[in-house]
């Protein structure tokens, strides 16, 4: 979906970052989707640590770019989460 937002948060046990679907709430704050948010990779043992966010509420294209930059800097990011961004990406117009 074109309006989806994502936040990149660290899972403290593994020190690996995961993407979570997010949205901008009524008060203008970035919030994670769901009562018990799970990352887009579906790993339900990962607990979101909101204090460790590398970015919050970015759109899909910006999330892809920022993940690539952070991975090139040596930050460990869940490959399944990043791969999900490409699977759900909007189609290229010709």
Image: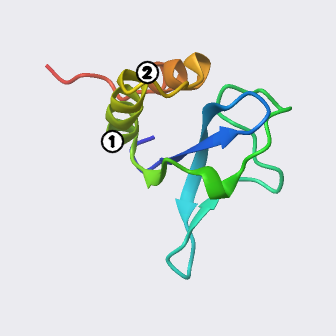
Pick the front one: 69 or 94: 69
Image quadrant for the N terminus?
top left
* 2 or 1: tag closer to the N-terminus: 1
Left or right: 16 in relation to 59: right
Compute the Cα span from label 2 to label 1. Answer: 12 Å
Mark 2, secondary structure of its residue:
helix
Left or right: 87 in relation to 51: left
Residue 59 vertical position relative to residue 57 in the rendered view, above or below: above
Specify the quadrant of the image occupied by residue 45: top right
- Determine the residue positioned at 38% across, 27% down: 73
Number of residues whose C-alpha sits closer than 10 Å to that of mark 1, classed few (under 14), some (14–19) or many (20 or more): some
Residue 59 vertical position relative to residue 14 in the rendered view, above or below: below
Image quadrant for the C terminus?
top left
- Determine the residue positioned at 44% across, 23% down: 74
Left or right: 53 in relation to 49: left
- Determine the residue positioned at 54% across, 23% down: 84
Instruction: Give the labeled residue for mark 2.
Output: 86
Specify the quadrant of the image occupied by residue 51: bottom right
Q: In the rendered structure, find residue 85 and report the number of the disc placed on it.
A: none
Percent across and percent down for residue 52 are: 61, 51
Residue 27 vertical position relative to residue 13 in the rendered view, above or below: below
Percent across and percent down for residue 71 are: 42, 24
How many numbered discs sit on the rendered protein? 2
Left or right: 1 in relation to 19: left
């Amino acid at each position: 979906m074109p309006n989806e937002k994502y936040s990149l948060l660290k899972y403290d046990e593994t020190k690996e970052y995961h993407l979570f679907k997010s949205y901008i709430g009524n008060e203008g704050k970035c919030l994670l989707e769901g009562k018990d948010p799970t990352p887009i990779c579906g790993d339900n043992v990962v607990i979101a640590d909101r204090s460790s966010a590398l970015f919050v509420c970015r759109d899909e294209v910006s999330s892809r770019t920022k993940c690539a930059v952070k991975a090139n800097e040596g930050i460990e990011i869940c490959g399944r989460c990043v791969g999900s961004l490409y699977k759900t990406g909007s189609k290229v117009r010709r």
